[in-house]
Image (cartoon, grey):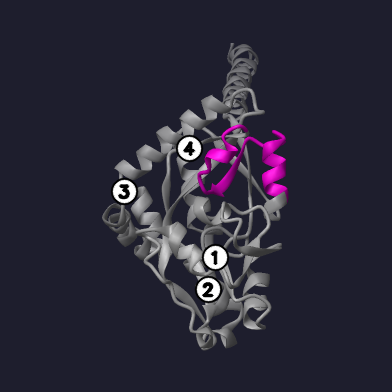
Amino acid sequence: MRNLLSRILVPVLCLNLAAVDGLAADSKIRVPVVTLATLDWEPYVGQDMDSYGYVYELVTQAFARGGYKARTQFYPWARALDTTQRGKVDALFPEYYSASRLGDFAYSDPFLGGPVGFYMRRDSGIEFSIDPRLDQQSALMGLSQYKFGVVRGYLNTDAFDNADFLYKEEVTDDLTNLQRLYHNRVQLIFIDKFVAEYLINNHLPQYKKVLAFLDPPLEIKYLYVAFSKKVPDYEQKLNAFNRGLKDIQRDGTMEDIYSRHGFKEVLWYQGEISRVR
């Protein structure tokens, strides 16, 4: 009798275990994946940074809360932009908002970035003729005699990007722009202040006494995830991200991410944005 029960129970038990394993496998398979393109843009995001930087961690966490597993590939910026525009991946981050790209992209809800503006040589004596936060167009016109360095494919500010009266030379990345500024090939470069500080501190320490940020910043930027409208279900993924973003804002996860990555200054800018605007 015991042998008979063994012959019956063992196969049944194995079938039950197989069913449980199958359900577990199915649950893993069912977790939807969102494919993302990004770039090395330290200190916001970078392959050599802790958890790939605070923006990477924030975006990944928000998608996870929204029910998606994020799969991210690093590219040079121009390629990341093109890859997303063509719908080869679902979305691109971090991106600035621009109405000119609404034909290609749907933008997520915003999260905080940092101050953007110009870097210059300390010995140049360059100053704004008017506070750009009051009248950016007039402030830029007062700099029209200078040569500017910009990164190909980057959005800057609308006023600066539309300023056809300024002479701008394109390069592939911010590091190259800083090097060209140091060697006097351009007089001003457009750059995020935190990015410039990171690159100088970690790659170009000899530039510290030579280069400086031209205060005040032109703007304090929000960052976005830009979803390709070529992807059929982009709205579903966009809504999932926004739900997750609200969730990590509400429970303090976002503030914890900023703090752990040494970006408490970003939290200060949250109040500064409202004050300037």
Label at residue 47: none
Answer whether labels 4 and 3 touch (C-beta < 8 Å): no
* Dot placed on the residue nearer the N-terminal end, 2 or 4: 4
**In the picture shown, does residue 68 fall above or below 39?**
above
Query: Which dot marks residue 252?
Result: 3
Would you name the residue on which mark 1 appears?
191
Q: Secondary structure at mark 4?
A: loop
Residues at marks 1 and 4 touching, judged by CB atoms closer than 8 Å: no
**Front disc: 2 or 4:** 2
**Three-letter amino acid code at disc 3?**
Gly
Q: Hey, what amino acid is under mark 2?
A: Tyr
Please report whichever mark, 4 or 3, sits nearer to the chain's N-terminal start: 4
- Left or right side of 201 for 3: right
Residue assigned mark 4: 108
* 253 w.r.t. 66: above or below: below
Find the magenta span and give its range.
79-103
For the residues bearing labels 1 and 2, Cβ distance under 8 angstroms? yes
Mark nearer the viewer, 3 or 2: 2
Is residue 180 in the magenta section?
no
What's the amino acid at mark 4?
A: Ser
Q: Residue 53 versus residue 102: which sits nearer the camera?
A: 102
